[in-house]
Image (cartoon, rainbow, N blue to C red):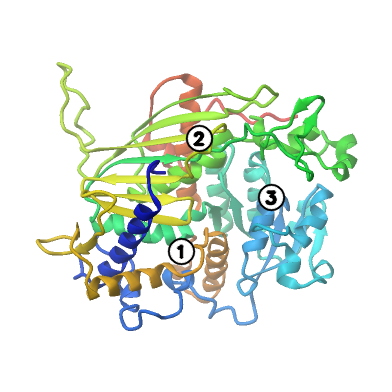
Amino acid sequence: MALDMTPEQKAIGQGNFQRVVGKLAEAPQQPQGKGMTRRRFMQGLIAGVAAAPISAAAYFAYSNSSFASRPVKAGLIGAGDEGGVLVGEHNPAYVEFIAYSDIRPSNYERIFRGEPTGPRKGFNHHYGNDARSRIRLYEDYRELLQNPEIEMVVIALPLHLHAQVTIEALRAGKHVLCEKLMAWNISQCKQMIHAAQQSDKLLSIGHQRHYSMLYAHAVEVINSGVLGDIRHIRALWHRNNALPRLDAQGREQRENGQLVLRDSWRPAIHSQDLVLQPRIRQLGYKSMEELVRWRIYKRTGGGLMAELGSHQLDACSIFLGKKKPLAVQAVGGKHFYQDDREVEDHVYCTYEFPGANYVPTRPLRRADGTCDYNDMVIVTYSSISTNAFEPYGECVMGTRGTMVIEAEQNVYLWGTAGRNTAVTATTAGGGPRLDASASDPADRRAGDMGQAALGYAPPSRGYKEEMEHLAYCIRMREQGTQADRDALKPRCDGPSAMADAIIALTANQAMKRQQRIAFEENWFRADSMDVPDADMVEERI
């Protein structure tokens, strides 16, 4: 994220973040909206700094104590890339997969075997090499939904199918975890929310940053006030797909005489899947290319903002207290690929968010053209396909400090004195602030506590936790009163995920219209028919 960080500056930034996380646990209780959001949890670290890493279940206040030998029985619909990630990351103590559905033969072996490296570990990793005898395949997902044993359905299908299959699952009496983006357009998001309400079933959407402890601690530091007033957030997710794809012997691959580029959105079509060709339109696709490479077509995907930008605008919204943006401007297009894809390969967006002291009735400019003060936070986002020089992440800039969250793995924190200065948190003179005082035993202890809070292994990206939490909510609803049932909901439920979809997909509209678009309150209300993308009508074949 920061172009010129040296290894020494990164080490200083990580140490600063750890010390502040630990120090804030010892700080006096701050007024509501300030201080650590899990302060009592953090105080538990004070008694034993070198304790075992803290689990997300403890942090997010859920556990498997209600499960015993009764995990939630689940079915997976969509056993491709994202389905494989979710299977690889799930915790069988909470969720037990007993069935899956997919139409592509190439996924039947892969979902069990997994992959040698990466997060797609496969069913065999969790259930043993005889998993195939215990996990049933349904080629038609509607038959899976009729299985009375299945309580929860995990949906990892192409974007244009999210609403249809989610609504059918809810009406069949299943709780649902659907991958992000919530739906292909906002009208579908609202239909999904209504279906969940009518069925009295839980709907969770897979924006996993809601379940990342790394992001949770970053939010705590922001909420404590040590960064001061947030003025700007710079987010990006850049990739370099301009490089040639190599075969096992290191030779450049070619297809029809053309160089094949390293583009994950244009995967090869497996020979096993060609058996589907005669009935491809019956299955709901125009071609094998649309089935396998659905992300690059507008009828089936939502482009870079749906697949990448939605993650990071979700994070920026969380950093700002889940405030709704005021407006967005965006530029994007097909600037590199010379193929049949229909979505942008480069996008650049500027969002206007209200700051803590924003006054809705105050105009941005006076009638005479001069500016009047109004508290605004500007968020910029870019996603490009031809240069991965910077790791993806977010840079949060405040009046007292700067925080960088890098690739969902590292957080760096610096004060206004610069990147070479170690800082800690102090409450001297009122609220918490960053202080460049020399390290002392108290600072070292705070750093140890912060490290214990963050854990010692690579941070979880939240896939496991989003499934655990939904399973926890399902079981606890069975035990509680009606009030308990109403209060229990996923951290990223339908309304929250719809807001994320509105933020992402309105940028697509700004690109299409080539204009600044102001967000409207009714768009965010599930009981309103108003949407920002009324022109996005699903195309049937």
Task: Give neighbour class at mark 2: few <14, some 14-19, many 20+ (Cα, 10 Å).
Answer: many
Query: Percent from the top left, x then y, of residue 411?
Result: 39, 56
* Left or right: 36 in relation to 182: left
Quadrant, the N terminus: top left
Select label 1 or label 2 by which is in front.
Answer: 2
**Other residues around mark 3 within 10 Å, as few (<14) / some (14–19) / many (≥20):** some
Q: Mark 1 or 2 closer to N-term?
A: 2
Q: Earlier in the sequence, mark 3 or mark 1?
A: 3
Q: Secondary structure at mark 1?
A: helix
For mark 1, does the 10 Å Cα neighbourhood hold few (<14), some (14 to 19), or many (20 or more) residues? few
Q: Nearer the viewer, mark 2 or mark 3?
A: 2
Q: Position of residue 290 (x, y in %)?
A: 74, 33
Vertical placement of residue 36 versus 380, above or below: below
Q: Which residue is mark 1?
A: 486
Select label 3 or label 1 by which is in front.
3
Residue 383, numbered circle: 2
